[in-house]
Image: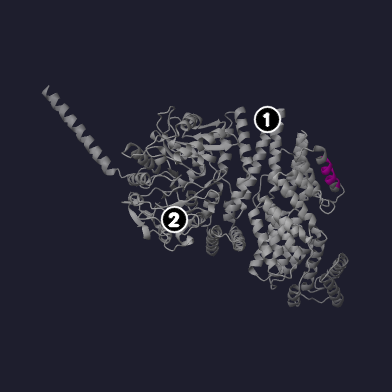
Amino acid sequence: MVRNLLRRIVWKGWLLLAGWLVCGYRTGNPANPQLIRALYNRANHLFHLPNPTDATDSLALATFQQMLSLAQSPGSAPDSLLFYAHLNSGILQDVNTNYAQAIASYLQAHRIKERNGSWSDSLLYEVAQHTGSAYYHLNNFDSASYFLLQAEALSQRFPHVPEKERLYNDLGVLYYENGNYVQSRNYFTQALAILRKNPAGDPGWVVNIENNIAAVCYKQGLYQQAITIYQTIRSQKVFTNEITINMGMAYKAMGNYLQALHWFYGVNPTALPRVLNELAHTHLLLHHADSAAYYLSRFNNLVLAHKIPPNNTYYGVHQLYLGDWLLQNQQYNRALAAYQQAIIVFSGHFKNSDPGYNPDQFTGTFTSYRLFDALLKKAATFEVLYQVQHNEAQLQAALRTYTSAISLLRYIEKSYDTDEAKLFLKNNNQQAYQKAVGVCMQLHTLHPGAGYAQQAFVIAERNKASVMYSGLVEKGYRKLPGIDPALMQKERNLKYNLARLSISTDKTADSSALVTLANEKADYEIQLAQVQHAIEQNSVYYQRKYSENWPRPDSIQQFITGQQAVISFYSAGNALHVFVITQHNFKHTRIDSFATIQQNIREWLTALQNPEAGRRFKGGKWGELLYTQLVKPVQALAGDKPEWIIIPDNILYYLPFESLPATPGAAAKPLIETTEISYQFGARFITANRARRLQTTPPAGTLAFAPFAQSGMRFPNATYNYMQQLPASAQEIAGVPGLQFANQQATKARFLQNISQYPVVHLATHAIADTGNSAASFIAFYPQYQQTTQDALYLEELYALNMEATQLIIISACETGNGQLVNSEGVLSITRGFAYAGCASMVNSLWKADDAATATILHQFHQYLQKGYTKSKALRQAKLDYLHGNALHKTPGYWAHLILTGDTQPLIKARMGYRWLLVTGVGVAVLLGVYILLKRRKKST
């Protein structure tokens, strides 16, 4: 548990002042007002002692309760005294960990305020904050979230309420419990910043918050950073047990179990009984079964002695570790029962003790991330039990439990406020999806026609590009009536400021400046969360945001033609699942040895990205292997379909399939000769993009930029400080209908000014893809200002753009399809940034390729688009023209880098009216001539 500070709260005089200001309301005509007021004054004096003790607190609480018992009759005491008596009684009960009684007192204070509508709502701030905190201690996360967010909203209305650091700490704890470590750290950081502004503040508070920040660090995998913080704050000699146990947790997360035990042994189990759980679990990880059992038993004895309540979070952790111990000892049914108890504790609402049942409703609840762990462990135990007993019911139970865990993950992901938090969650929780797909395929083997393969496809697709898809649809939902436009503008401004901060952070090396920027970022992200919570008050928006829908194979079949095949890949461990959907069929195959395939793909990509002019292509060996491993199995499932829509996964995001051989043998032609290929982020995008209307016959206008056509020049970036000339970029955009900017005119400002006015955008420029830090990826424009923020368009800036009117963007810049790979979300590339902004389709480059070859292909691409070709057909034909033309260099490295992702529909309807009229006319004339000739011959006969 992150929260370790004893709630020893000494309230200041501002609350008293507010109390006396409202003292004249509802005074009534009490029988003995002097006694009631005297008791209140005495209790209040004890409550506000500068150095209170347990004895003075107990006396204060007893006196408040005596005063309240005398004031039970209506009108026997002013509401102002009753309000503060109940509030202060709650605080004293809170300190003594009597949370249920504290909540009752807080709620009574809340009711008194509500019946006095003329009082300032600021009085509810402290009530809401303490009520939320008390509910958290009772493991009631829904109510805790409700009251803490209410307190946060009040703090926005009344910025001068005191001790906001306590609220931010509580919210940080709550987000920690939810697994949103990014937002949790933001709140802790803000709490710490407030404390450090007050030199006379409590140093213990500072240590507590830093301890919490370190706990977040090890959850984010920043183990050394966490340990450094712990080592620093241990010297303060406060909260020693809390810091020591967290040090052990960090070492346990690192896999250094012996070092973890060393720190756990240094914790006093009387003060922190939960260390017994951690000792048990660490011994279990070391396969010390007897030692694990000993510590589990010690903790359970405390539960039996009523020293730990059975709904306590750490009792849930105990049940989780007990399940692990039972599983390790092959006591499967008892392990299932233990995991079920953990699920009950972590859920807070679900009460069914039968392991065959799972929670299935998460919307509207605040969910502990630990619930996901418990569900995952229970599902895995059902799988193990099936392997032992071969009872199909256990396999079905495993699938139901995995499905519940996935539904929980989807809800948690949608509840997070930033993409950074969502991506962190997603990158660390692929196991549930992979296991669920595996169980589905086992059931498919048992019952081939029962729809389990289709269910496996749906589970895999629920995970594909889910963060980006949610972001896109939520943009649409924000247009619903009833949502305040001012909130929407504030959200846009905050996202813009966050993008700018990311740019500044990437450029800054000074440690103190980085701390300042981190604090600013935390503040903006907290404000963004507040705005998004305000938007969620619209019930229609909330319902749509948290609703789940995903296409099944039969629904996708309605959106594809008889010539198309949708090919979706999904990697799970060393297996690659291939799902193929055609208009009338759904097929699946599993390709094993995916690790070997990945290595072959890396070799193939190396050969593609390093062509040698005048030399034979060196990737032939790897191409033959990949034909056998990848192409041949797909061809077997897709049949004779000439158009493939590929939904990649894992390393396949980097692979241009059209470059691979279409047949076996060293002289095989590439797939582009036989197949029209495009790519998609996920199946949901196929159905979504088909909703876009086809444009009418006039040619589509293009907004084109070529900033480095004339010369290379210095660029304002510390790492990439010079941009080479792209002499062929002028040819690339020459003759394209629309608006063109080249050289000095091709600035970022003009791009932003004109982007929404054209359905097609073409950027013939440089781009930088940072695979280690996606936020550092950018597109280079003419360096008019010699300032990074003015001359480069960064990836995170793209997310905030509105490009819903853009049907196609062509980014011929090198590496625009490259970037950091996130499991099943895709590559965090510049291409994805444009898709996130709402662009329907993108042509991008996967690697730095020949400038002249790129220009030739894209010039032809525009010509075919103007003829009404589909985007995928236009790009294929442009590449074939290059291959069959007089170009000197025709190996795949010169043409395969350009790929189309997204909607394939044509930009304009094919202008075929006059052509068909001419053909028809000629045909009629020929038939008429034949008819007359035959008639003359007949007469002569």
Which residue does the image show at 69% across and 44% down from the upper left? 373
Kind of residue at disc 1? Glu
Residue marked by disc 2: 722
Residue 355 location, quadrant? top right
Of residue 728 and residue 5, the one placed in the foreground of this image is 728
Q: Which label sits on residue 392?
A: 1
**Mark 1 surroundings within 10 Å by alpha-carbon count, few (fewer than 14), some (14 through 19), many (20 or more):** some
Please tell me which residue is depicted at 53% across the width and 32% down the height of the picture: 588
- Dot 2: few (<14), some (14–19), or many (≥20) neighbours within 10 Å? few
Query: Is there CB contact under 8 Å for labels 1 and 2?
Result: no
- Magenta segment boundaries in residue numbering: 293-301
Q: Is residue 693 left or right of residue 400?
A: left
The dominant secondary structure in magenta is helix
Could you tell me the amino acid type at mark 2? Answer: Tyr
**301 lies above or below 805:** above
- Quick one: which residue is furthest to the top in this view? 941
Chain-order first, disc 1 or disc 2: 1
**Does residue 366 appear in the picture of this structure?**
no
Report the number of numbered marks: 2
